[in-house]
């Protein structure tokens, strides 16, 4: 099944995530699809540890430790939506050819899937959380960004 993927990069006019709407990466899984007031139900109760600088919060009674991750210049975290559309591909004129090599490899009237990724908001930082311990993914992300910059920077 052919798949066409196109992504729209955020323009300079793309809405930035206001400080009140911080991105959070939580170590949870949920089937909830509704709307909630994150500020009232989560961020209002966040406190910062005096010794380690980590943020503290709870989610459904379970302790969380968080770290504010600031991304390097030129990088951003994005909130995206993905729309998938299926359409019926008409049979091509080559399918009526008597020559086998002229026939398409795909079946006639095949479904074609088209996917569009849209950027809804961007931010230069986000908060990463872990259960009962300091987040380690924040350091790993920074290391990967540094490595990517080293690999993709032309040598002089």
Image (tube, rainbow, N blue to C red):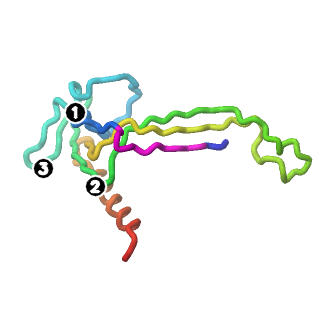
Quarter where residue 73 is shown: bottom left
What residue range appears in magenta? 4-14
Pinpoint residue 152: horizontal percent, then vertical percent: 40, 65
Pinpoint residue 1: horizontal percent, then vertical percent: 67, 42
- 3D distance between C-alphas at marks 1 and 2: 21 Å
Quarter where residue 28 is shown: top left
- Does the magenta stretch mainly form a helix, a strand or a loop? loop
Q: Are marks 3 and 1 in contact (CB under 8 Å)?
A: no
Question: How crowded is the residue under tag 3: few (<14 C-alpha within 10 Å), some, or many (20+)?
Answer: few
In the displayed structure, does residue 110 sit left or right of residue 10?
Answer: right
Q: Which mark is residue 20?
A: 1
Q: Are marks 3 and 2 in contact (CB under 8 Å)?
A: no
Rendered position, 32 above or below 13: above
Mark 1 secondary-structure assignment = helix
- Most foreground residue, 93 or 123: 93
Q: Which mark is residue 2?
A: none
In the displayed structure, does residue 1 sit left or right of residue 134?
Answer: right
Q: Is residue 11 magenta?
A: yes
Foreground tag (3 vs 2)? 2
- Most foreground residue, 103 or 11: 11
Q: Residue at x 75, y 44 (%)?
A: 106
Mark 2 secondary-structure assignment = loop
Mark 3 secondary-structure assignment = loop
Quarter of the image for the C terminus: give it.
Answer: bottom left
Which residue position holds label 2?
A: 72
Q: Residue at x 31, y 56 (%)?
A: 140
Which residue position holds label 3?
A: 52
Question: How crowded is the residue under tag 2: few (<14 C-alpha within 10 Å), some, or many (20+)?
Answer: few
Instruction: Tell me which label, 1 or 2, sits earlier in the chain.
Output: 1
């Amino acid at each position: 099944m052919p798949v066409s993927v196109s992504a729209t990069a955020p323009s300079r006019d793309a809405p930035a995530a206001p400080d009140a709407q911080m991105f959070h990466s939580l170590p949870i899984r949920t089937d909830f699809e509704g709307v909630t007031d994150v500020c009232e139900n989560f961020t209002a109760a966040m406190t910062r540890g005096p010794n380690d600088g980590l943020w503290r919060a709870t989610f459904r009674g379970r302790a969380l430790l968080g770290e504010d991750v600031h991304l390097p210049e030129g990088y951003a975290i994005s909130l995206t939506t993905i729309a998938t559309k299926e359409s019926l591909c008409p049979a091509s004129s080559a399918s009526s050819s008597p020559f086998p090599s002229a026939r398409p490899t795909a079946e006639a009237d095949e479904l074609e899937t088209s996917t569009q990724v849209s950027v809804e908001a961007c931010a230069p930082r986000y908060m990463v959380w872990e259960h009962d311990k300091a987040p380690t993914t924040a350091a790993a992300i920074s290391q990967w960004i540094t490595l990517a910059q080293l690999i993709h920077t032309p040598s002089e």
